[in-house]
Amino acid sequence: MSSGIGSCAYIFQKLDNYFRQQGLSRPCVDETRVQMCADPQLVVVKGHLHERMNCILRKRLARASYGIVIEQPFSEKQHFSQRVKLGLLNRKKYITDQIEWFVKRGDRIPAGKTINITVERRAALGAPKQWTENIVWSENGGHWLPKNMTQRGFQLSRL
């Protein structure tokens, strides 16, 4: 803490207690601690240097799950009673509107990490060279994520 508020023991104690309580139920603030600074004028510069040297804030916690809508090869065991589409080029059966989750809520993501997804499209020679991808997001995590577009628990964005 810095400036005039930084020397107030009462506020320091209240903030420290608050973050300790929040750490019990929220993993993203588990190790957050409030500190008083001896040099309030230099606290921002020192904090920036300290963060750079020790990589304290290098991981972020995903607050939502993100996925992409894909087609999967048909499997009678997995895709019972789902909509089947016949591939135009290879005449194989595909299941449409499946969701592949690439970030799940609660995942720890290093700062600056790029998430790459390979998207495969089969197209005829005369087909347009541009297409739209459907990206979905959900506040659910882990085992509660929907596997396809017929289930609930996600919101759709088009890119």
Image (cartoon, grey):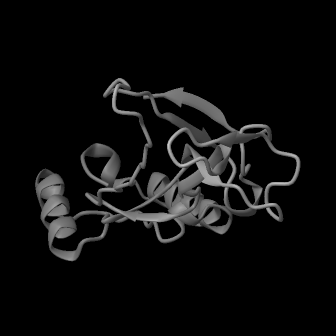
Residue at 31% over, 28% down: 129
Q: Nearer the viewer, residue 126 or 8?
A: 126
Q: Nearer the viewer, residue 142 or 151?
A: 151
Looking at this view, name the residue that lies furthest to the bottom.
Answer: 54
Q: Is residue 148 visible?
A: yes
Residue at 12% over, 51% down: 41
**In this rendering, is residue 90 above or below 57?**
above
Q: Is residue 143 left or right of residue 107?
A: right
The picture quadrant where one finds residue 42 is bottom left
Picture quarter with the C terminus? top left
Picture quarter with the N terminus? bottom left
Residue at 11% over, 56% down: 45
Q: Nearer the viewer, residue 157 or 82?
A: 82
How far across and down, in percent of the image, does residue 126 sit? 35, 25
Total numbered labels: 0
How far across and down, in percent of the image, does residue 2 sit? 26, 51
